[in-house]
Amino acid sequence: TIYSEYGEQGISLMKVYMKNLKNLLDKKNIKLTICVYPWPTQVWHDDLESLQVKIWSQFAKNNQIGFMNFFPYFIQKGLSDTEKVEVLQKYFVYSYEHFNKKGHRLIAEKFLEKFEGSK
C-alpha cells in the first residue's frame, strides 16, 4: 500500500525530528506540547480516532510531552450531513483544509484555556 511504502517511513522520520526538538527544548528548560487538529475530510467522516491522534498521543505519553487533541471541538458523532457542512463552513476556508478566522479563534481559545488554567 502507499501507506506502507511512504507513510510509515514518514511517520518514523517525524518521530525522530520531534524527539530531537524535545531534546533541544529540554536543554533550554522549555516545555513542549503537541497539538493535533482535524482536516475537513476527518470532520466529514467523524474521524475522532485518526492516525495522527493515535500516533501523537502515544508519542507524547511515551516521551513526557504535553498533548492537546482539538478533534473533539470540531467533530461530533451523529451529525447530519447538513450539520457537518455547517461546521465546515463555520470553521474552515472553503475548499481548503485550513481554518478560517473562526476556526483559528476556537483553537486559540481552547489552547489558552488549557495554559492559562495551568498557571
Image (tube, grey):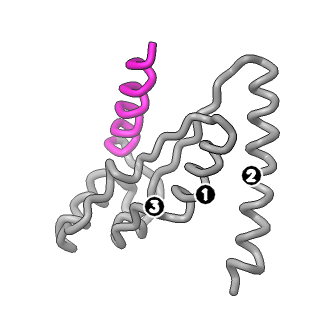
Q: CA distance from mark 2 to mark 3?
A: 21 Å
Q: Residues within 10 Å of mark 3 (few under 14, many from 20)?
A: some
Q: Label 1 is placed on what type of residue?
A: Ile
Dot 2: what SS? helix
Residue at 49%, 64% (x, y): give it: 50
Residue 10 lies in quadrant: bottom right
Residue ID for mark 1: 55
Residue ID for mark 2: 15
Q: Which residues are magenta?
A: 102-119
Q: Which of the image's four quarters has the N terminus?
A: bottom right
Residue at 41%, 25% (x, y): give it: 112
Tag 2 and tag 1, C-beta contact below 8 Å: yes
Q: Label 2 is placed on what type of residue?
A: Lys
Q: Is residue 27 magenta?
A: no
Residue ID for mark 3: 39
Q: Residues within 10 Å of mark 2 (few under 14, many from 20)?
A: some
The numbered mark, 2 or 3, whose residue comes first in the sequence reads 2
Q: Label 3 is placed on what type of residue?
A: Trp
